[in-house]
Every structure is written in structure tokens, then in C-alpha cells.
Amino acid sequence: MIYMQNRDYDNFGHILNELSPGTALREGLENVLAAQTGALIVFGDTDDIKSMSDGGFFINEDFLPAKLYELAKMDGAIILSENGRRIVYANTHLNPDSSIETSETGIRHRTAERVAKQTGLLVISISQRRDLITLYKDGGKYVLPDVEQLISKANQGIQTVEKYRKSFEESVEMLNGLELEDLVSLNDVCIVIQHGEMLAKMGREVKRYINELGTEGDIINTHLEQLIGDLDDELKNIVKDYSYPNAPETFDEDYFMDLTEISRRLGYYSEVDVLDAPVFTKGYRLLSRIKRVPDYVIDNLIDYFEDFHSILNADMEQLDEVEGVGAVRARNIIEGLRRIRELYAFIKK
């Protein structure tokens, strides 16, 4: 499985969009990196920065990649506006608090990390010898990978998403049949949720690479969106189908790694193993697959009949009694449920 190796990514997610390939900022950074001149760039002309600055030139001009490249030839730091659209100062010497701890060794990187921790601003250090662009903000650090590396990781991630999608679809097909035959166990439900959550998590990981790629990741993003599809709605409906009113609203991010934790997420608490216990769908997920049946009608159907198999076996007259259904919609519901059963029978063969 391919996961982002930098734990501080979440601190920089929105920033990486602004620094993605094809943007003026990224072009300027890449030019400095290619020239091997090195640079220290601060985003924000704040009072904190002014108090630790010594010397430099007041520029106050619009940001251009070529200007950044030329100014980086001087030794001092470059101060940009917080949004990076203007170059405010150049060749400025920064004196952050030397007592601030830093894990870096080079002078430029030590200064960058200390400035970021002291001010909370984004600081970028471009290494003169190591061909690295490193971002610092607060106590976080992130090294920008090159485009080819990102594309390779994104493509590997997409392959993993494809495998997870297949596993999820297979488990959903199994659940469809079990629901139609009224043979669902809690274990069956938890497996589907586990596969779906694993797919969602891997999708988020690939999305991070895509965000860093900017327009370079458009094709990969289209493929990812097709693979993820309506996953969120499917998972929400499964939870609605099987959760108790006492189900917790918050839970650990990786709760889905353990089937027992998933059962607790649904509100099933027991000192004994409850995964083999029979459970019964309310019908939200399968009913949502019928076209032109609004959510409020689905709610009314479930409230009226109280269990899915009563809806499944209801005739037009019984369905017509439900508020919001009517004769036309009743016929549509019966036809939709018939198609679901036929599809299951076909797959079962």
C-alpha cells in the first residue's frame, strides 16, 4: 500500500495547491533550484519578521519567477507578501531566536525552521547542494518531491485504488444478495464498511499527490473520481441501514481496521462477540438505487413499513398508502425492486 511518508502533509495541503507545477511560484522555486544558488523565502511581511530583520532592500513589486531567480543570487532572505503575490524585501538578514530547537544542520535550513516556529509563517528553504525545496510552517516540515516522482506515486496509488474498488464491489454484491434473502450477519456488514473505508482512505492518499501535481494531475484525478464514484453515499446509507440510535458520532480515524470496532461504530456493544449475530437492513441503500424516489419518500416508506422485506413484498395499493408515493411512484418502486432482484439472480447464476 502506498501512503504519504511525510506525516506533516496535512499542515501544508492548502499551501501545496499554490505551489503545484505550472504556478508562477513553483516556476520561480524550480528556477532557483536549477541554478543551484539556494534561497530562503518567507511568506509574510509581519511585525515579527520586521523585528528579526536586518538590512535588505525594499522591493514592493509584483511577484515574477524571473525576479525571484535574480534576487536569489544575493545571500539574504527574500520576504514575500503572505499570499506570495508581491516581493516585499530582498537580501534581508534574519535573526530568529537561537534558543528555538531545530533538527536541521545547515545554516539556511536552521534559520528557516526557527523563523517558521517563531512566527507561524510559511518559510521555504532551497538547498544549494542537496537539490531540495523544503517547506517549514509552525513546527511542520515538508520536502517537495519532483513531478516525475509524484506522477509515479500517484499511478501506483491508482493501481491500489482499483484493487480496493474491486474488493468493495464484490462485498457489496454479496451484501445485496444477503439483504434480499434476509440472511445478513453483522460480520457481513462490517466487512463491506471495512472495504469501503480502505478504498476511501487510499483515495485520499492519491488525492494528495494529485493536489501537489496541479494541472499535471488532471487525467489521474478524472480516473480517481470514476473509481471513487458514489462511495460516500453508499457508506452513509449502510451506516443508516444498520446503526443503532446510540451509535457514536465520533470515532478514531482508523477504526475500520478492526471489525469489532466497526460494530461499535454502528452501536453494537457487547462483552461477547456479536459479529455472527443476524442483523436486518432498514432499506436505505437499496431503495436509494431506484431512480426518481426522493430521500423523504424513502424515509416515509421505512417509517411506514418498519422493515425492508415488507417494502420488498408490498403491492401498489400498500405502497400508495405511504405519504408522498402515489400510483406512479408506487409502480416505479415495484419495478425498481424487481430489477434489483433480477440483477441479483443473474449474478448468483
Image (tube, helix red, strand yellow):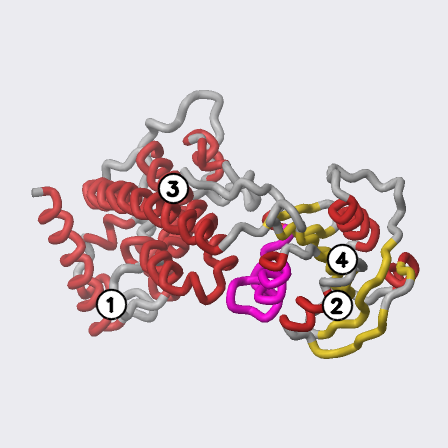
Q: CA distance from mark 1 to mark 2?
A: 66 Å
> Is residue 181 placed above or below 261 in the rendered structure?
below
Query: Which residue type carries mark 4?
Result: Leu
Q: Name the residue that disc number 3 marks.
A: 193
Q: Secondary structure at mark 3?
A: helix
The earlier-in-sequence mark between 1 and 3 is 3
The earlier-in-sequence mark between 4 and 2 is 2
Label annotation for residue 320: 1
What residue appears at the point 23 percent right and 45 percent down from the top-left corner? 173
Q: Position of residue 300 (x, y in %)?
A: 36, 62
The earlier-in-sequence mark between 3 and 2 is 2
The residue mark sitting in front, 3 or 4, is: 4
Task: State if disc 2 and disc 3 touch (CB < 8 Å).
Answer: no
Query: Which residue type carries mark 2?
Result: Leu
Between 320 and 205, the one nearer to me in the picture: 205
What residue appears at the point 28 percent right and 50 percent down from the top-left corner? 308
The earlier-in-sequence mark between 1 and 2 is 2
What residue appears at the point 45 percent right and 37 percent down from the top-left corner? 256
